[in-house]
């Protein structure tokens, strides 16, 4: 039976990069590698402009009934004056919580062809293959109380709350332990247990669970040190697991190890095997509409979709191989451009990856 993929392009460069990822899905469909039905929907600023809501009911309903969602990016300066509840970002957060997508996998892998594109020394990043597991439906992003209130003195106070229940911590830790088990058997849990009780509990749960995974070596690291270690010696890490906010920040940091944030895909999974797939970067308003954005993070997100939600691991490997092949050929978008390579735009990069998909080994 066909699987349903909901495509939510979003804002800024979202439609540009998603168009290239959809080309890849359609090419795989034409080759008979997958059997999918594509549907489109509105989210973010585009949805707000169309109907005054960054997550229209029909979008959430379509996402719930889909096997997988492909998302571009949301947000931009145009919508910044709106109250938080109407912001494009709220649409994305509503999808994550509405679908229960608690497990966000953000792999940071350096393609050897891009070793000179990283701002770090080659010996620091060569061979990098790191997996960040970010909890995605809890923490200060969703904790109550929140808001801006006026005190009796007339002064205003802004409040957000970091919260994790034991069961929320346990289920994300189990995802991370299982992943580490399939990789190099090392898990680093990142917290701020020296200051925040919420993450003290996190550390306690991680330590307790490690008894179930004797084959995985668990370590703990404070988030400030982890940010420094990611830049100092990133290859010390195999799997990192952390909360929503720390994971957001650390994954942008890890992105630069791979040459560009335009290279980092993600999968957000729930307990029912549904997933949403998106690049970790945003809508890049500074380059939107110019056809220069790197579509590779989105195309690699399609590979993650093929593997995790469409039961098509061979097609996933084909996409990853096609990306490597195009990089071998020297094609580069502006963000990963280095001397001697050929600079191309978003569509040319997408077309080249599609063409490489069709090549036999
Ligand atoms: P951003 O990730 O959009 O951009 C940061 C920098 O990286 C910019 O210089 C941008 O040009 C560059 N960049 C990002 N993606 C690129 C790509 N594919 N190719 C080449 N260069 C790329 O972060 P920001 O500027 O802080 O945020 C812009 C907007 O995006 C904000 O409204 C923010 O809330 C939103 N945002 C959305 C998501 C999402 O939808 N998942 C993620 C992050 C930020
Ligand atoms: C990301 C983004 C989002 C986040 C924003 C846009 C809500 O930065 O996907 O990394 O903070 O999770
Ligand atoms: Mn982010």
Image: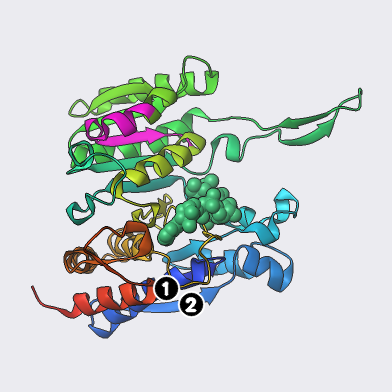
Q: Is residue 122 left or right of residue 142?
A: left
Circle nearer the N terminus (2, 1): 1
Is residue 148 something one can see in this rendering?
yes
Is residue 100 something one can see in this rendering?
no
> Within the magenta stretch, is there residue 60?
no
Highlighted magenta segment, given as a residue range: 228-243
The location of residue 52, given as percent across then percent down, is: 74, 66
Q: Residue at x 28, y 31 (%)?
A: 187
The location of residue 5, given as percent across then percent down, is: 42, 71
Q: Is residue 132 left or right of residue 315?
A: right
- Position of the N terminus, as image quadrant, is bottom left
Dot 2 lies on which element?
Answer: strand
| Vertical comparison of 24 with 87: above or below | below
Query: Dot 2 corresponds to which residue?
Result: 39
Marker count (numbered): 2
The location of residue 295, given as percent across then percent down, is: 38, 66
- Position of the C terminus, as image quadrant, is bottom left
- The label number, if any, that marks residue 153 in the structure image: none
Query: Dot 1 corresponds to which residue?
Result: 4
**Of marks 2 and 1, the one in the foreground:** 2
Marks 2,1: beta carbons within 8 A: yes
Q: Residue at x 56, y 73 (%)?
A: 41
Quadrant hosting residue 162: top right
Q: Residue at x 26, y 27 (%)?
A: 212
Q: Residues within 10 Å of mark 1 (few under 14, many from 20)?
A: some
């Amino acid at each position: 039976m066909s699987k349903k993929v909901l495509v939510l392009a979003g804002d800024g460069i979202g439609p540009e990069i998603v168009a290239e990822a959809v080309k890849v899905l359609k090419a795989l469909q034409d080759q008979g590698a997958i059997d999918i039905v594509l549907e489109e929907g509105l989210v973010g600023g585009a949805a707000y402009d169309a109907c005054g809501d960054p997550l229209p009911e029909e979008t959430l309903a379509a996402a719930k009934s889909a096997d997988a969602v492909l998302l571009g990016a949301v947000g931009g300066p145009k919508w910044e004056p709106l109250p938080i509840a109407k912001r494009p970002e709220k649409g994305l957060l509503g999808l994550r919580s509405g679908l229960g997508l608690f497990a966000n996998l953000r792999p940071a892998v350096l393609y050897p062809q891009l070793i000179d594109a990283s701002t770090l020394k080659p010996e620091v990043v060569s061979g990098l293959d790191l997996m960040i597991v970010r909890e995605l439906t809890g923490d200060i992003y969703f904790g109550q109380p929140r808001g801006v209130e006026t005190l009796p003195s007339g002064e205003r106070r802004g409040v957000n709350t970091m919260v994790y229940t034991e069961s929320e911590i346990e289920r994300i830790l189990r995802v991370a332990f299982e992943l580490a088990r399939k990789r190099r058997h090392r898990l680093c849990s990142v917290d701020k247990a020296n200051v925040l009780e919420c993450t003290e509990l996190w550390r306690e749960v991680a330590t307790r669970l490690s008894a179930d995974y004797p084959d995985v070596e668990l370590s703990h690291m404070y988030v400030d040190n982890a940010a420094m270690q990611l830049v100092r010696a990133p290859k010390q890490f195999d799997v990192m697991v952390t909360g929503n906010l720390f994971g957001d920040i650390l994954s942008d940091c890890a992105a630069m190890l791979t040459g560009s944030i335009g290279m980092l895909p993600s999968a957000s999974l729930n307990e029912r095997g549904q997933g949403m797939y998106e690049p970790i970067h945003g809508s890049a308003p500074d380059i939107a509409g110019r056809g220069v954005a790197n579509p590779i993070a989105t195309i690699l997100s399609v590979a993650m979709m093929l593997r995790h939600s469409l039961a098509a691991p061979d097609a996933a490997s084909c996409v990853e191989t096609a990306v490597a092949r195009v990089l071998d050929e020297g094609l580069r978008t502006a963000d990963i451009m280095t001397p001697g390579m050929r600079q191309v735009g978003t569509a040319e990069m997408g077309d080249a990856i599609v063409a490489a998909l069709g090549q036999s080994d």
